Amino acid sequence: MGLYVVGVTIFLLAPLVFPMIISFSSGSRIEFPPPGFSLQWYKAAWANELFLAGAVTSLIIAAITTAISIVAGTAAAIAINHYRFAGRSLVQVVLMLPLALPAIVKGLGVLFVLPSYHMSQGMAATVLSHCTMCIPYVAYLVLASLASYDITLEQASANLGASRSRTFFRITLPLIKPGIVAGGVFAFLMSFDNISLSLFTSNGDTLPLRLMQHIQHQEDPAVAAVSSVLVLVALVVMVMFGRVLRESQLGALKTSSPE
Amino acid sequence: MSYAYKLRRTAPWLWLAPAIAIFIPFFIIPIAVVVRNSFNVDDPLALMVSDFTLINYRNVITDPYYYRVIFNSLWVSAAITLGTLLIGYPFAYFLVRRAKRSLIFPLWAIYTPLVVSIIVRAFGWIVITADSGLINAALLSVGLVHEPVKILFEVEGMMVAMVHRYLPLMVIPLVNALSRIDTQLYSASLNLGASDQRTFWKITVPLSLPGFVAGTQLVFAVVLSDFVIPSLLGSTRFRMLAPVVYEAAMIRVAWANAAALASVMLLIVVTMLVTSTLTYRRLAPWARGL
């Protein structure tokens, strides 16, 4: 049984580890064992303007998406947690619905409606479509942290003469911060890595799309270098936020979202 | 109506306003438009023409090419769901039952791929399975084969990568469900004379049902609509639904055709989710409180 766990663990990690080995290869193509050690592929990746520009585009899209999703998702979670109103259960279902429906259908739909909004494919369309996928994550994670939130604290604050906004910023916000942080990290990762929506809404200039086009044409070890950097970033995120993400039940949800 | 009462009624909608302002134009209307466009007609000379016909659905059902694509996708979804379940259940069971410090590492191994870009994971499989990749280098050097074995761009290679991609989505709900089981039930069952095996089938399996249902629903739906793995690792002789939808919309610019294919995908996913949830509630009403 122990052997089985080791086997599955190796299976899970192998595709993350072997590109790293190739990324340090001095050879001119993907080959095992690598003929020698060199940093040439990191230089090549860094010199590739398409990768660099793609990374900048993806970072901007992910940052704006995260900011909007945090505000809209947190506000929606407060509405659901603090109030009982007609249509509340419908709102709950619709809020989580984007995670249950295939992203490729959503992306196609956004492509169809853009002309009637006088928009074209690009950053704005991509950010707004990513938001429909990231708001549910933020709302879900903030709702989870609101579950242990004592609403009488707000009444106490009001009784002591604090204004509504002061109560919100001094009481509510600090207490639900873990959920907001987890939601924000998650929204950023999901947006940065998104393909199925960006395919239809962007100009094909995000990093994942650029890498995908590149891989389809050649087996370039420079992609291994980019991969290794992305794995490293993911590991840093895991170390920094792993506990928050795990405790917030990210697993139950990460991709309740089909592509 | 007093001012306070009015405020109380409008307050939740004010909090919801930002989410609604994004959801209606960029989620609800687009999904509705996909379904609506599936009844339009593609004009070979221009963009699609507004109409109300079932011709696109007839094409999808009668054309052997589309019929094949839908069948392929359903078959692969079922196979990957079964595969991740068979590999994932023992793995999750072991992680939960033998929870020791040494198992922190396998738990990390489950979560790490989730935060790594899917392109990186797909590229990892290219490095491993390509003609000059790890597996073929090993087989050739040992002398087991004289020609590289074709794995990349074959259905089998694609399915291995899919099992890898979606295994965490099966394992995590199972771990959540299994770790919620009261361990005293195991001792009680054993004290009452049940064998380990009987305890497993009568206690562990029924109580892990919520994780099983969540995991299988999740994996089936995501495999059916997977775009990246079939595009990067799949075979051109074995097409899957999502890349075909993309090609219809963006390369052939046959929007009504793409809309019909997407609507079929939507219908399959929604039908699967609804029927499996209803069956689950019907057959295991006791599981709702778990």
Image (cartoon, rainbow, N blue to C red):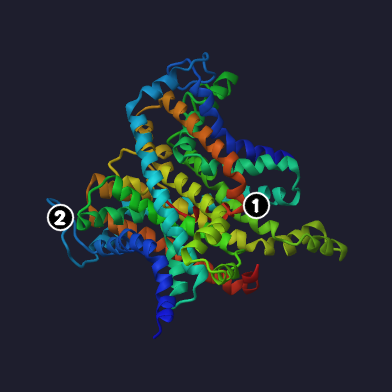
The quarter of the rendered structure image containing the N terminus of chain A is top right
Q: Position of residue A93 (x, y in %)?
A: 46, 67
Residue at 47% across, 59% down: A74
Neighbours of disc 2 within 10 Å: few (<14), some (14-19), many (20+):
some
Amino acid on which disc 2 is placed: Asp
Residue at the outermost bottom position? B1
Q: Determine the secondary structure under disc 1.
A: helix
Along the line of sight, which residue is nearer the eye, A155 or B94?
A: A155
Along the line of sight, which residue is nearer the eye, B20 or A227?
A: B20
The residue that disc 2 covers is B43
Residue B236 appears in the picture as rendered:
no
Neighbours of disc 1 within 10 Å: few (<14), some (14-19), many (20+):
many
User: Is there a contact, CB below 8 Å, between mark 1 and mark 2?
Assistant: no
Along the line of sight, which residue is nearer the eye, B100 or B271?
A: B100
Q: Determine the secondary structure under disc 2.
A: loop
| Residue B89 horizontal side relative to residue B254, left or right | right
> Would you place residue A11 above or below residue A92 in this image?
above
Residue A252 appears in the picture as rendered:
yes
> Would you place residue A232 above or below residue A70 in this image?
above
Q: Position of residue B58 (x, y in %)?
A: 27, 62
Q: Sequence-wise, which precedes: disc 1 or disc 2?
A: 2
> Would you place residue A164 above or below residue A245 in this image?
below
Q: Are marks 1 and 2 on the same chain?
A: yes
Residue at 31% across, 38% down: A205
Q: Position of residue A157 (x, y in %)?
A: 56, 67
Q: Chain of mark 1?
A: B
Numbered mark located on residue A220 in the image: none
Residue at 68% across, 64% down: B206
Numbered mark located on residue B89 in the image: 1
